Amino acid sequence: ATALATKIQETKGLVRPSFDRSLENASTEDEKSRGLSNFELYATLRSINAQLGGSKAATRAFQLAWGKELIQSYAPNANRDDFVTPFPEKVEEELSDVDYDKNSLLDALGKLTVFLGKMKSGGVIGYSELSIPYDDYGSVVTVALDDYSPIGAEILLSEQGLGEGPMQAVLRALLADAGIRGELSTFYIDPSTTRQEAYRPTQLLLSANSLSKI
């Protein structure tokens, strides 16, 4: 723990000038607060990755442990009754022929619903939407988040191959705990443009696909 704390302070000193430049351009207190949060998240996760020696197995183990800790902290008692989706009438039909325990998935999505509600209350995200897309027969779950505060840090971490953010950690942990495996894809979206030179993503879309029993 002491070695990690030292590494985080070293990393902060190394990357602070890059973040300071963007903070200087912040026009509101909210922008400045988000910039500082991104700085803290990036420096911490970059340091953890370095401490783990870049090991993919160790990084995945950390992600699962982190995700479980976040759920335990913010949604320990949530279950399927807390799951909110725009298409509730389709859920039973979509999950009618899956090889995994559908109730375990619904419990996981209930926990995720409550967790995202806490994140919205804390200003980390804006609008959120969970869905089991129709005609994918329970093989896909999507999580869409608007006005996602940590997106700047996450994009940097992704581009540098240094790991994923808290939402991916939570979703991976929930699926693992439900006895479900699959592939997780991450997309960063700017809803206002597709022009690369003006691209400023604010939305996070997670797609867990090819879901099956572990």
Image (cartoon, rainbow, N blue to C red):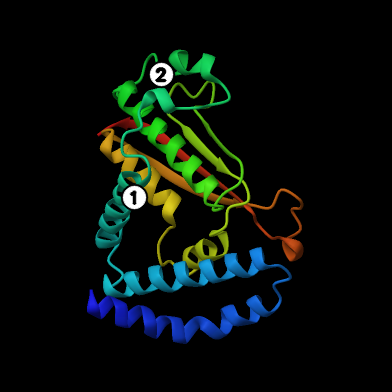
Task: Tell me the element at label 1.
Answer: helix
Res. 180 image quadrant: top left
Give the mark, 1 or 2, whose residue is nearer the N terminus: 1
Residue 31, given in percent of the width and then of the height, sits at: 65, 66
Marks 1 and 2, how far apart in space?
25 Å
Task: Tell me the element at label 2.
Answer: loop
Q: Would residue 105 be found to the left or right of residue 206 on screen? A: left
Residue with the mark numbered 1: 67
Residue 83, given in percent of the width and then of the height, sits at: 45, 27
Q: Quadrant of the N terminus?
A: bottom left
Q: Would residue 174 be found to the left or right of residue 167 on screen? A: left
Residue at 42% in and 38% down:
112
Neighbour tally class for label 2: few under 14, some 14-19, many 20 plus, Cα within 10 Å: many
Residue with the mark numbered 2: 95
Residue at 69% in and 52% down:
190
Above-or-below relation of 179 to 6: above
Q: Quadrant of the C terminus?
A: top left
Question: Mark 2 belongs to which amino acid?
Answer: Leu
Residue 144, given in percent of the width and then of the height, sits at: 56, 41
Neighbour tally class for label 1: few under 14, some 14-19, many 20 plus, Cα within 10 Å: many
Specify the label residue 122 is tagged with: none
Residue at 46% in and 31% down:
140
Above-or-below relation of 68 to 197: above
